[in-house]
Amino acid sequence: IPPSLRCAAWIINVVSAANLTMSKSDCDDYGTLKKVRVLEHGWDLVLKSIFPDPSDLERAEVLDFGVGHDHLINILMKDHGGNIPERGIQSLTKVLHAARDSLGIEYCLWLPDITCLLLSFMPESYTYATIREMVHEDSSYFLAVSRAQHLAWCKTFADLLKRCFPQTAAVMEQIGALTPLGLDPIMKRFFVPLLKRKHVMRIMDIFTGEGAHAIFRIGTTLCCLSHAHLGESIRERCDNAATFWEGVRRFAHSKHFDFEIFLSQVYMTKKILGFTRPVFPRPEFVSRIISENEVWAENNLTNISIHEEKKPLGLVEGDVPMTLAKDSLERLSLAKWLPPSLQSTKLDLIYSTSHHGRSLEMFYRCCSSSRHTITLMEVLGTDIVIGMYATHTWKVNPDGYGDGGCFLFRLKPNAECFRFKVGAVVASFGGEGGDDENRATRVQDMGQLMISSESFISMGVGEGGASGLRLNEDLTRGSTSKSLGFDNDELVGPGIEVFDVGLVEVYRFIRDVDNKPVDGDVDPWKGLFE
């Protein structure tokens, strides 16, 4: 759909839905050149009132409207096609501040994502006008603009899923994916983390006309269809909402997901007593459920959390005392960096230089049955702890192995994680052509991430044979430098590349749900959609 047509269609749809008494021709005017000057003039007046001086805009930050810091970072840096450019962030900042200061919206979890989607096809003036119409008179047609409304909508989603797809609802309820927090990818993020961007745009096409009712209809059907394709893997390996939604995302990005067929299922009908009726309840029925649930929401405002509270990784107490991961703040940092399937696990110490001695042979032996490990090392004579997360079993393999899930980190002080970035590798080859893309992909796929031999272990490839992080054969000396794939700073400190190593510890992961080690592949969806 051409951008100009989508811009016109979205604002006409919203104006029509928000102004039932307005004539069709007046609504259609919003999609023509007739309204351009009016909307731009109104937008200029709003900007002058909110940002009377250019310095006001320079100091303004992007508002999150309750979505939370972590989600806001994903919005700005990942979920809308990568890093939003500076100009785009400035437009987003203007519109969101106008929504708060001019329209009086204080809380609206969908607003940051919806504003990004609108700005993808509209100028700032049209985006602001569209949001203004969404909250015109009855905002609940499009948006939940209070915490109580959000809770009521989440409960309504769960009620509708139980009514329409009870088997799916039972599975999701068992793993916590039907709680207000568990429904984040839909009820907080408007499908953006789940679906391909082009499919989110198609949902936006529908949403601008049908309002929130479309999200309930599409969301419940997506859950049911995903449940059918994920099959028994959910019961066998999925014990939390994050892993379930990752499975939904994998399915929605696979060749097995046909969006056109999916939409036909969303709007499926059935015959009852000779009459054709939609499978999904009508908007009037859904509105009635929401109204009933708003009373429940008001009574439970203080009892239900809508923001994920990250917990530190647990610890398994064994015969060998653990030191470097004992502090809960450090384990909380690790939990934030790890993939969702490992965030509710416990750390089990499998190697320590204080107990097993300093040799790579013993290091490999202790790690031989653990695929995913965290290696922590102390910089001797300091309070600095750095490390690396490995996605494959450490072994003698000087040709390289591992995958893009590996990462380097500084645990303390100033905890920071450095993940593998294909873009960093492409840039390091000095080009943007297809050959460079293919070469970058080969670097990741062929495993130039973990390199190990009888004389060293390392992660990350640097210039001139250097490594992002490297340990020598007796684990007494280490080195660190900027690597091509991780684009990391010096882990120890500026200008410090070589350092003496104190204590070294390696941890494996134990599942909290059954206290069994995560020895094999922790990805329950691997190979399912290939």
Image (cartoon, rainbow, N blue to C red):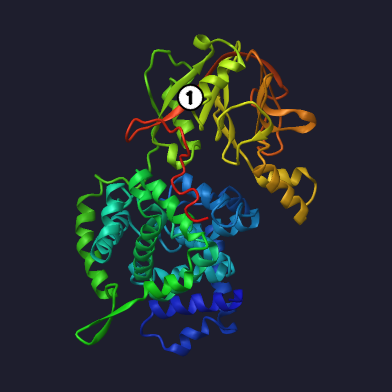
Q: Is residue 501 left or right of residue 497?
A: left
Q: Residue 277 location, x and y as percent?
A: 27, 81
Q: Residue 204 location, x and y as percent?
A: 47, 69
Figure check: 154 above or below 40: above
Kind of residue at badge 1: Tyr
> Which residue is depicted at the point 54% across and 62% down?
197
Q: Residue 339 location, x and y as percent?
A: 48, 40
Q: Quarter-wise, where is residue 502 in the image?
A: top right
Q: Is residue 86 left or right of residue 137?
A: right
Q: Residue 222 location, x and y as percent?
A: 39, 63
> Which residue is depicted at the point 53% across and 64% down?
117
Query: In this orientation, does residue 25 appear?
Result: yes
At label 1, counting other C-alpha atoms closer than 10 Å, the crowd grade (few under 14, some 14-19, many 20 or more) is: many
Figure check: 49 above or below 374: below
Count of marks overlaid on the render = 1
Residue 105 or residue 394, whichever sits in front: 394
Figure check: 377 above or below 75: above
Q: Secondary structure at mark 1?
A: strand
Q: Which residue is mark 1?
A: 507
